[in-house]
Amino acid sequence: MSKVLILIPSRMSAQRLPGKPLLKINNLPVISHVVKRGQETHLGEVIVCTEDEEILLAVKKNGGQAILTGNHHKNGTERIAEALQKLKKNDIDFVISLQGDEPAIDPLDIKKLFNFMNENNYEIGTLASKIKDSSQLDNKNIVKVLTKEKLEKNNFVTALKFTRENLSKKEDNIYHHIGVYCYKTSTLEKFVNLEQTPNEVENRLEQLRAMDNHIQINVALANSSPIGIDTEEDYLALKKIMEYKS
């Protein structure tokens, strides 16, 4: 069985909602909820990678593992690559990167992604969900992925394009991208040694660096589309949902 490590990049200085990893839902920081979702997969160790001492201390206080990384990273993938190097875990086959601001991510979707990667030995895998509201196509805060084939429950299809731009409702095979990645360890190391591409910088999408360098990304269909916390409104809406469910 392949060995997997779950890493969660996190930092305090988000542009739209600074300090969001430590906002509380049910008296637990957002970042610690994400740790719990990772642990619920029972796939492997779950470790937060952060440049901020406050996040490190909060995660450890709530029973999680965390490691300090540099403050120079351009994206979360570079941060988890540094953490992997510092951890000196040479027997890891796959690394899963979870978004630190998606405390409602479904552990079953994470497991599904890993199982596809493990069975097929692809380079990079990610998740997407069906777009149920056509207004999402016009929302530049929502990343869309176009796939070669229609996403079904049991297939793992090739991504053709990732974009924030408005898309025509006539386009085929458009889905809401969920920013969870599973990397073959060798591919993660290769990725972070590549230069940023103009396409990546212009669109603010790190996965375009892989595609611009002919690294294939495969996509699995998620059962649900988690609410990411980008704004105060997102936080309050998700807090209400999660606290009601509990």
Image (cartoon, rainbow, N blue to C red):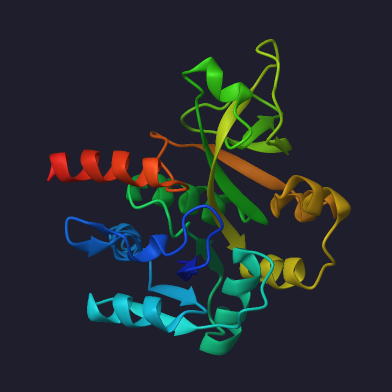
Vertical side of 215 occupied by 148: above or below:
above
Residue 7, x across and y down, in percent: 47, 69
Vertical side of 141 occupied by 18: above or below:
below
Please report the residue visible at 46 percent of the width from the left and 19 percent of the height from the top: 132
For this view, does 77 lie left or right of residue 204? Answer: left
Choose between 220 and 233: the one closer to the eye.
233
For this view, does 192 lie left or right of residue 107? Answer: right
Q: Quadrant of residue 159?
A: top right
Vertical side of 36 occupied by 58: above or below:
below
The reply to whether residue 88 is in sight is: no
Residue 121, x across and y down, in percent: 62, 56
The reply to whether residue 128 is in sight is: yes
For this view, does 185 lie left or right of residue 11? Answer: right
Please report the residue visible at 56 percent of the width from the left and 57 percent of the height from the top: 15
Residue 174, x across and y down, in percent: 63, 24
Please report the residue visible at 70 percent of the width from the left and 65 percent of the height from the top: 187
Please report the residue visible at 30 percent of the width from the left and 77 percent of the height from the top: 58
The number of numbered badges drawn on the structure is 0
Choose between 215 and 68: the one closer to the eye.
68
Q: Quadrant of residue 156?
A: top right
> Which residue of the protein is positioned furthest toward the top in this rendering?
170
Placement of the N terminus among the 4 image quadrants: bottom left
For this view, does 175 lie left or right of residue 129? Answer: right
Residue 6, x across and y down, in percent: 45, 67
